[in-house]
Image (cartoon, rainbow, N blue to C red):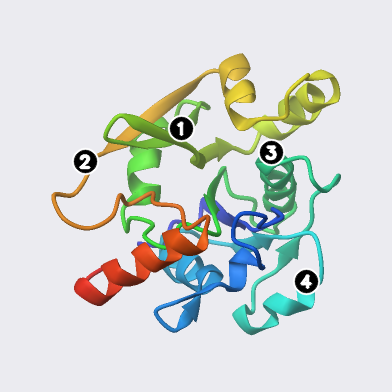
Amino acid sequence: MTDGTIAGIILAGGTSRRMGSDKAFAMLGGRPLVAHAASRLAPQVGPLAINANAEPQRFDGLHLPVVADDSPDTGPLGGVLAGLRWAAGHPQAPRHLVTVPVDGPFIPADLVARLSDVGGASGTIVIAASGERDHPVFALWPLEMAERLAAWRLTAKSHGVRAFLAATGFAVASWPLPALGPDPFFNANTPDDLARAEAWLAGDAAL
């Protein structure tokens, strides 16, 4: 169910070194990874955008706004901050932003609802977890976190998401690992990962 109080952004600002080509347009099941992420996240949020840092016109076919980092090549937090500022400038500013990576083709249909259930009223960042692993880029961010994040990035020795979460505090929403099929937060980072995802899609039409 679409929640207009929550915006979404697909983080596609990385360099795709391990994939060897633009990860956003790596093909899976006849569609690029960015289309999988958009189709899974769009029904769960209000406004939706893509975070990317070069040639925004390559995303024209998705008909979504493209938001660049203030300083490219500073990791996912640059995209998170760009997304928070974009959402805050929306005419009907949402209260939260959900982030997902462009290489996550199996985003759960209840991602936003469950993240919101854990922290929607608390002003706390909420990250996803599955099994014994957490997934800090699949997360719910209060919009008021933007200025704190911007200030932290000016002095932080590490620009990693985990470093910011450790400094700020966070909550966790957990999903079970399926008996068959992929982790819902599986990342297709390499050609081998993409081949595994293709095999899963071929074997389970419900994914």
Circle 1 — which element? strand
Crowdedness of circle 1 by 10 Å Cα count: few (<14), some, many (20+)? Answer: many
- The mark that comes first in sequence, 1 or 3, is 3
Distance from disc 4 to disc 3, alpha carbons, whole Å, reads: 19 Å
Q: Judge depth for marks 1 and 3 and give the one in front.
A: 3
Mark 1 lies on residue: 126
Residue 206 percent across, percent down from the top left = 22, 71
Q: Judge depth for marks 4 and 1 and give the one in front.
A: 4
Q: Return the residue nearer the eye: 73 or 63.
A: 73
Q: Are marks 2 and 3 in contact (CB under 8 Å)?
A: no
Mark 3 lies on residue: 77
Answer with the quarter of the image where residue 8 lies: bottom right
Mark 2 lies on residue: 176
Q: Amino acid at mark 4?
A: Pro
Crowdedness of circle 3 by 10 Å Cα count: few (<14), some, many (20+)? Answer: many
Q: Point out the image quarter for the N terminus.
A: bottom left
Residue 141 percent across, percent down from the top left = 56, 37
Q: Judge depth for marks 2 and 1 and give the one in front.
A: 2
Residue 142 percent across, percent down from the top left = 58, 35
Q: Residue at x 78, y 20 (%)?
A: 156
Q: Point out the image quarter for the C terminus.
A: bottom left
- The mark that comes first in sequence, 2 or 1, is 1
Circle 3 — which element? helix
Q: Residue at x 78, y 71 (%)?
A: 56
Crowdedness of circle 4 by 10 Å Cα count: few (<14), some, many (20+)? Answer: some
Q: Are marks 2 and 1 in contact (CB under 8 Å)?
A: no
- The mark that comes first in sequence, 4 or 1, is 4
Q: Return the residue nearer the eye: 179 or 81.
A: 179
Is residue 49 rendered to the left or right of residue 172? right
Circle 4 — which element? helix
Mark 4 lies on residue: 56
Distance from disc 2 to disc 1, alpha carbons, whole Å, reads: 17 Å
